[in-house]
Amino acid sequence: MSFVTAITPKEAFELLKKDNFSVLVDVRTLEEFASIGTVNPEEFNNRMVLLPWQLMPTMEVNESFEDKLNEETTKLFGDKAQEAKIIFMCRSGARSYQAANHSLMNGYKHCYNLTNGFEGDINDSGQRGQVNGWKAESLPWEQK
């Protein structure tokens, strides 16, 4: 039986840069992509998929998640898509774990959960992106 592997933001960034058989899947909502920003994937050949695990406003699980993930990973890796290293990321690590576990149960062999996600934990002032996570590690990101 396989398990979801935890990976830190820095480890994920290094893996994505070094291994062309890896991809970052950001599972936050469309609204989060627009208002908070996204990873800038230029340093790892733009191997990133923006694919919400849950949809606003109800936060119901995205019924087309599995089909869209299969479609996107097949574009990148062909018939070996389920063997790729897939790093799932959300705001703080909870939704991405759910998506990674779901994908593992649906045939993907190497599913990683990005610890602390894009923004990480809340600091003493109630702000995210300062304590831990992708942004706090000063890894490449952008807001459009």
Image: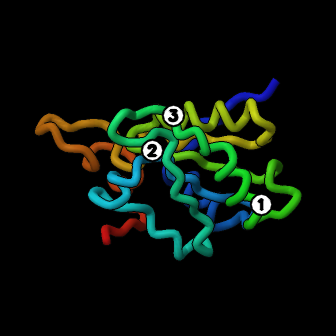
Give the left or right position of residue 61, taking residue 128 as reference: right
Which residue is pictured at 39% across the width and 66% down the height? 141
SS category of the residue bearing label 1: helix
User: Which residue lies under the disc numbered 3?
Assistant: 61
Crowd around label 3: few <14 · some 14–19 · many ≥20 (10 Å): some
Distance from the alpha carbon under mark 1 to that under mark 2 = 22 Å
Residue 140 x/y as whole percent: 42, 67
Residue type, label 1: Thr
Q: Is residue 78 above or below residue 1?
A: below
Residue positioned most to the top:
1
Q: Closer to us: mark 1 or mark 2?
A: 1
- Above or below residue 45? Residue 1 is above
For the residue carrying disc 1, how many other residues have a C-alpha within 10 Å: few (<14), some (14-19), or many (20+)?
Answer: some
In three-dimensional space, the C-alpha distance between marks 2 and 3, rounded to whole angstroms, equals 14 Å
Chain-order first, disc 2 or disc 3: 3
- Give the quarter of the image for residue 59: top left
> Circle 1 is placed at which residue position?
74
Question: What's the CA distance linking mark 3 and mark 1?
Answer: 22 Å
Residue type at mark 3 is Val
Nearest to the observer: residue 22 or residue 138: 22
Q: Which element is circle 3 on?
A: strand
Q: Quadrant of residue 132?
A: top left
